[in-house]
Amino acid sequence: GAVVSQHPSWVICKSGTSVKIECRSLDFQATTMFWYRQFPKQSLMLMATSNEGSKATYEQGVEKDKFLINHASLTLSTLTVTSAHPEDSSFYICSSTDDRTSTYEQYFGPGTRLTVT
Amino acid sequence: GEDVEQSLFLSVREGDSSVINCTYTDSSSTYLYWYKQEPGAGLQLLTYIFSNMDMKQDQRLTVLLNKKDKHLSLRIADTQTGDSAIYFCAESIDGNKLVFGAGTILRVKS
């Protein structure tokens, strides 16, 4: 099946710094990728939809200047948390659809745990 | 707005069947999914069903959909300890934006 990887798997950063998280489709091309955020013992909340070669579409309430998304190639999308604060600590998960198959199947990465101190 | 609800916890004995229930509010939902999440890991797509279907079976998994009541269930036959995980129900109108439930923790006792 389609494999999605994320890097890093976990990161600790100081308040005020920026952190970049990568999401890669390993064996397929992905025009569309999605970024989710998951709080402990809670569900996933869609943050934004990332489209290769165009601007990301953000969900209501998500600050686009704080969560910068770049989808520069068909296999890589990045999420940069700018000027991170402790409240940004969370589990960030990306997902992707496979351009070769149906658009209603999303394949999820293993997630990145961000801790801001 | 869209909302998906699940029971929070289910405990079963190894070898028994597990049934995880989910209700959703959006009658426009076209795709309904079940995902499995193991500790510290991402989500694994288990199965999905289209809204024009009543049932889908895939090996030990059976999904039942009652569209009238907006109720979705996942039955796992012969539950094993390796099935212990969090199970998320999700719905989508177009297959892009997924709305997830809070997840059901399944604990399998040996």
Image (cartoon, helix red, strand yellow):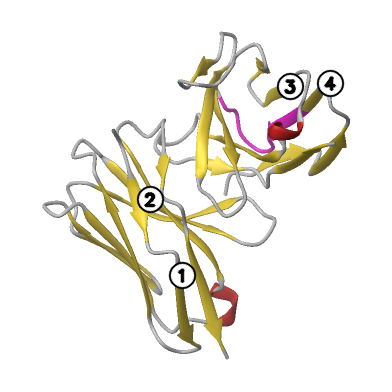
Q: Which residue is mark 1?
A: B9
Decide: is A88 above or below B10.
Answer: above
Q: Quadrant of the N terminus of chain B?
A: top left
Residue B33 disc label: 2
Residue A84, percent from left and from top? 77, 25
Distance from Cα at disc 3 to Cα at disc 4: 13 Å
Distance from Cα at disc 2 to Cα at disc 1: 19 Å
Residue A82, percent from left and from top? 76, 18
Q: Quadrant of the C terminus of chain B?
A: bottom right
For mark 2, give the secondary structure: strand
Residue A40 disc label: none
- Say which residue appears at 41% left-offset and 31% top-offset: B97
Residue A63, percent from left and from top? 59, 16
Number of the front mark, 3 or 2: 3
> Can residue A98 be seen here?
no
Left or right of B72? Residue A68 is: right
Distance from Cα at disc 2 to Cα at disc 4: 38 Å
Number of the front mark, 3 or 4: 4
The boundaries of the magenta stretch are: A21-30
For mark 3, give the secondary structure: strand
- Say which residue appears at 27% left-offset and 58% top-offset: B72
The chain that hosts pointer 4 is A
Amino acid carrying label 2: it is Tyr
Q: Which residue is mark 4?
A: A16
Residue B11, percent from left and from top? 47, 80
Amino acid carrying label 3: it is Thr
Query: Which residue is more in the foreground, A90 or B19?
Result: A90
- Say which residue appears at 40% left-offset and 72% top-offset: B59
Distance from Cα at disc 3 to Cα at disc 2: 29 Å
Q: Which residue is mark 3?
A: A80
The chain that hosts pointer 3 is A
Distance from Cα at disc 4 to Cα at disc 1: 38 Å
